[in-house]
Amino acid sequence: AELTEALRLCSEVGLARGHLLRELRSASFQSLHKFSDPNLVSLGMSLAKLRMLTSASFEELLAGITDVSALKPASSVALLLTMAWVDGGDAATYEKVAAQVVAATQSLHVGHLCDAAWALAARPIGSSSELAAVCSAAFEQKPSQQR
């Protein structure tokens, strides 16, 4: 969990690639079997943001996720976005995750819906109805009063 948080923090502050990031990436891939499914998704998204995740590395990470259908909606969005960023994962898995996200649109906040819309626009599936559903859900939500 600490390794995942360190990579997440590095990706959010936009640290340049360096020795520390390479070591964190290496350490994380050496112990993929120790991560929970949500942590694997977070790890993948952080590495993708840092542009340190190749399609081959993503496939290895995706293989470590035991049950994609058991992910919470926010984790499903993160996985969908990561799959679109690295163009990784097979079409069936992508469509399964996209269907989960579309089914959970009412429980997602606007930020997650925007991420899902970007992913669906970048790597479209079948028809555009999934993208339309996500965008519609985003526009229907009331803006947050916390500023």
Image: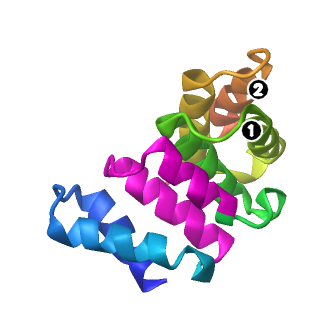
Judge left or right: residue 81 versus residue 68: left
At 15% across and 62% down in the image, what residue appears?
18
- Mark drawn on residue 98: 1
In the rendered image of this protein, does residue 132 appear above or below residue 55? above
Tell me whether circle 2 and circle 1 mark residues in contact (CB < 8 Å).
Answer: yes
Q: Is residue 110 visible?
A: no
45 is within the stretch colored magenta: yes
- In the picture, measured across the screen, residue 141 lies left or right of residue 100, that is left
Sequence-wise, the earlier of marks 2 and 1 is 1
Q: Which residue is mark 2?
A: 130
Residue 99 at x, y percent in the picture: 82, 39
Which quadrant of the view contains residue 16? bottom left
Q: Secondary structure at mark 1?
A: helix
Magenta range is 36-63
Q: Is residue 94 above or below residue 15?
A: above
Looking at the picture, does residue 60 appear above or below residue 1?
above
Q: Secondary structure at mark 2?
A: helix
Q: Position of residue 122 (x, y in %)?
A: 54, 24
Task: Residue at 59%, 78% (x, y): give it.
Answer: 35
